[in-house]
Image (cartoon, coloured by chain):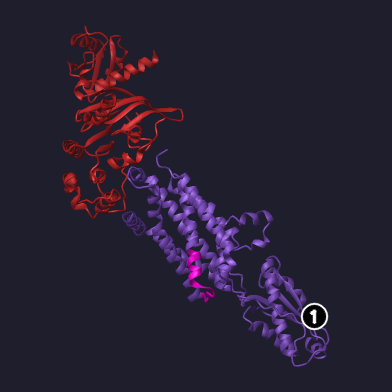
Amino acid sequence: MECRVRSDYNIRLMIRISDVEKHFGDVTALDKVTLSVQRGELFGLIGPDGAGKTTLLRIIASLMIPDAGSTLVAGHDVVKDFAKIRQMVGYMPGRFSLYQDLSVLENITFFASIFKTTLEENYDLIRDIYVQIEPFKHRQAGKLSGGMKQKLALCCALVHRPELLILDEPTTGVDAVSRIEFWDILNRLKAMGITIIVSTPYMDEASLCERIALIQGGHLLSIDTPAAVAASFPHSLFSVKTDNFFLLLTHLREWSATFSAYSFGEYVHFTPTSETITERDIMSFLVEKGHSETHVTKTQPTIEDSFMYLMMKKQNQYAG
Amino acid sequence: MKAFIKKEIYHIFRDYRSMLILFGMPVVQVLIFGFAITNEIKDAKVTILDQSGDVLSNRFVSKLTASGYFKADRALDHPSQIEPAFREGRVKQVIVIPSGFGADLGLHKQVTIQILGDASDPNTANMLKNYTMAVLNAFQMQEMGMQALPVDVRVEPIMYYNPELKGVYMFVPGTMAIILMLVSAMMTSISIAREKELGTMEVLLVSPLRPWQIIVGKVIPYVALSFVNALLILSLGWFVFGVPIIGHKGFLMLEVLLFIIMSLSLGIFISTVSPTQQVAMLLSMFALMLPTILLSGFIFPIENMPVFLQWISNLMPSKWFIIIVRDVMLKGSGIAYLWKETLIIFGMTIFFIGLSIANFKLRLE
């Protein structure tokens, strides 16, 4: 009975990571990471550069052995059963990793054939992407634009119809329009039943995932749906703007009533230590400091605000 | 697998630099070694101080200059001019013919000819001396041959396999060793290191391809190319320099193939320890090229090396390969004589393949 429950659990889960650690010399890249991804999910790994995203994805792709903890992909252990995993995943590294001196078509054909399949066989899966790069199919991959390169790389990662697609920062260095297109494609792939785990440093892309994990310094800060992560922000949040942006940030950070203040586009996102502080209090503080054209509005916390909050909490934890 | 080989061939033919290394270099190297770097004497500058000036001495001088080895500089009149001629670098050798040369020879008296060499380049000086003595011997034969001498012991050296002592006979096997080493080892190590450097190795690893498939796929195009290169060098040697292939050609080809596979396994081994193309290149250059050139007996005879270096030279695969190629081409030897060398190269191949497999990473570091 116990066994039955376990296998059901494994069938539902595409990735199960428990207490994974990875060190590079003195640097801890991953510290006790525990994470599960359901089959058919579009899962985002959100965090700044150096947070450990790539390392985690490489462990899932069986490219790296964790120092501790276990990782199962579709029930296969990434260390022992790596050959099985390599049959069923499509992996797209952060760096453009195709043959630059081969043409678009040659790259796709090559990757299809190393998985013993053909472009025609799985054409339905990649058709939407392929038609966009088809006009350039005889161009060398190295001469494509950034967005085109990403689409080609995705084609190559998909051509063998993987069950799990691992994408490491696929939209880094890609223009805004191509990024939106890219996420559209990912949603369509998800609809076709492919599990996708994608990492990105862009907070605005987080909301496009079904569930996200915030990662920083090798720690997972939070795992939830984007909406829940944003809503988990426990304080009130104000968006502040004055005529002197630099001084505004300095003054707010010096203020005893400030919990946090950081730049957010052209605004400063400000969180007070106490919920009793209102727009009016902030206004009068700033006017006193000599600011003019002051705008203060209460605003909805975003994922980035939650991320900043969790990061600060973690840091304070260490400091304390 | 087929796709992998096809891909590899695209890589090679689309990179004009690798094409240049692959096909330009063998031709250039053979031609350079064959024509320029040669130990043979041709038109060496000499001068003659003829103190006799008779018919016989004149005949001797013209025989010297007609030999093709020497080019006579302005003749000297006085011994005091010898030193300045050397100092000015005008001549490499001075031949002094004593007065009464012809007369004394006619009387069967002993005649002494003095050969003064510029030993600041000892090899050349020595060789010029030998050539001069050879001409002198021939001259003596010609002039005195008719007259039976009471006692006449004569040394008659015969140089086997390369009777004309042609340097190019040496260079063809040597160049072949270098080129095959370079093409096979360097090009494969660089091409595998390139996959690592550009990150494509990462993608290849996360695929059902087995490491041996990746390696064999990489290597096969280079086996073919190296083989074409070997044929190119052999035919250059044959058509341009007239170097013969006396032994069994099929056997020679098999030995060449064995050496190519040895070099490739060495190249793969280098690539497993180099993270980037540059490291692979440097390792191939310093670990392979220089020892191949210096220690294989290609340029410097192994017998003349200190014992320690002789010992190291045994570790050079190219040393054994050069012995094999030379013996097959020039002596016509077969496996009966060369089984030891063949076995050594075979052993090295197994060793490097084993080492590469042990070193090949299934994952990233």
Q: Colour of chain B?
A: purple
How far from the left and from the top, in percent, is residue B239? 48, 76
Location of residue A265 in the rendering, given as x and y in whole percent from the top left corner: 23, 26
Residue B307 in the magenta stretch? The answer is: no
Range covered by the magenta-colored residues = B241-256
Helix, strand or loop at mark 1:
loop
Q: Quadrant of residue A179?
A: top left
What is the tally of numbered marks visible in this picture?
Answer: 1
Residue B18 as seen in the image, left or right of residue A158: right
Q: Where is residue B345 shown, x and y percent of the image?
A: 54, 58
Identify the residue at horizontal 49%, vertical 64% (top origin): B256
Name the residue that disc number 1 marks.
B112
Asked if residue B222 is positioned above or below residue A36 in the image, the reply reads below
The chain coloured red in the image:
A
> From this viewpoint, is residue B92 visible?
yes
Q: Residue furthest front?
A: A1
Quick one: B311 or B216, which is closer to the camera?
B216
Residue B331 in the image: above or below residue A134: below
> Is the C terminus of chain A in the top left, top right, bottom left or bottom right quadrant?
top left
Q: Amino acid at mark 1?
A: Thr
Percent across and percent down for residue A259 are 29, 13
* Nearer to me, B324 or B29: B324
In the image, A55: left or right of B301?
left
Query: Relative to the observer, which residue lies in front, A81 or B238?
Result: A81
Chain for disc number 1: B
* Magenta highlight on residue B244: yes
